[in-house]
Amino acid sequence: MLKHLMNRFSRTLYVQIWPDNIQLLDLTSGDIFSDEPVLVVEQSNGKPLVTFGQAARLRAKPDSQVLSPFTHPRTLLADFAAAEKLLQLLVKRISGKAWFTPPPFVIIHPMAKTEGGLTMIEARAFRELALGAGAHDTLLYQGPPLSAENFDLQALKQTNPDWRKI
């Protein structure tokens, strides 16, 4: 019963990933967030401070660590832990600062390095990435870009019958 209520009130986020850009579209509200997919890790009072995006990279101190989790010559997902943290921060950013927000349903759409299709390892990694970032469920999508106007979750689930098995 509680899971049904949470699913009913949760957002659906559509995440497009390129090596040099990540875009989140909140299909519930129509909000869009797009930025460079980088994490900047620096020490602040002995604790790591993690920020993201192009602005954070431009403000980074010389001793900061700049991570690009979607930059690798052979595959889109290069650094799982950094990608998971980046997606967590982005989901929080687009979800707003409400006291309680149910976990979103996340559609992951790799936009590069998918020639020949994704391996089962890549598919599972993207699913685990979304779940680790706070999604209550996820769907890996490969196809033409979606928009809020042409979005139909039930149709997507029907055309991707193995979406829960990955």
Image (cartoon, grey):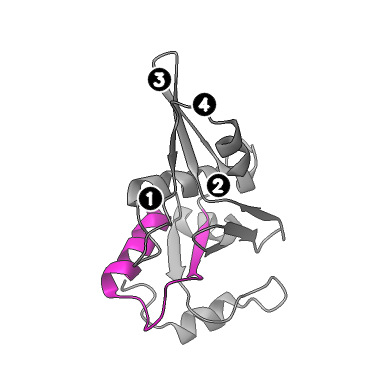
- Viewer-side label of 1, 3: 3
3 or 2: tag closer to the N-terminus: 3
Q: Residue furthest left?
A: 121
Question: What percent of the width, then of the height, locates residue 77?
Answer: 38, 60
Q: Which residue was labeled with disc 4? A: 61
Q: Which of the marked residues, 2 or 1, is nearer the chain's N terminus?
A: 2
Tell me which amino acid carries mark 4. Answer: Lys
Q: Residue furthest bottom?
A: 159
Q: Which mark is residue 76?
A: none
Q: Say left or right for 126 vs 29.
A: left
Residue in the foreground of this view, choosing between 36 and 85 = 36
The residue beneath circle 1 is 132
First in sequence, mark 4 or 2: give its number. Answer: 4
- Alpha carbon of mark 1 to alpha carbon of mark 3: how far? 22 Å
Q: Foreground residue, 103 or 54?
A: 54
Task: From the top left corner, tell me how far across and down residue 7 is, in percent.
Answer: 52, 59
Residue 32 at x, y = what percent?
Answer: 69, 57
Q: Residues within 10 Å of mark 4 (few under 14, many from 20)?
A: some
Ranked by sequence position, the earlier of labels 1 and 3 is 3
What is the number of the mark on residue 47? 3
In the picture provided, is 52 more to the left or to the right than 66? right
- Between the residue at mark 2 and the residue at mark 1, the CA separation in whole angstroms equals 13 Å
Mark sitting on residue 90: 2
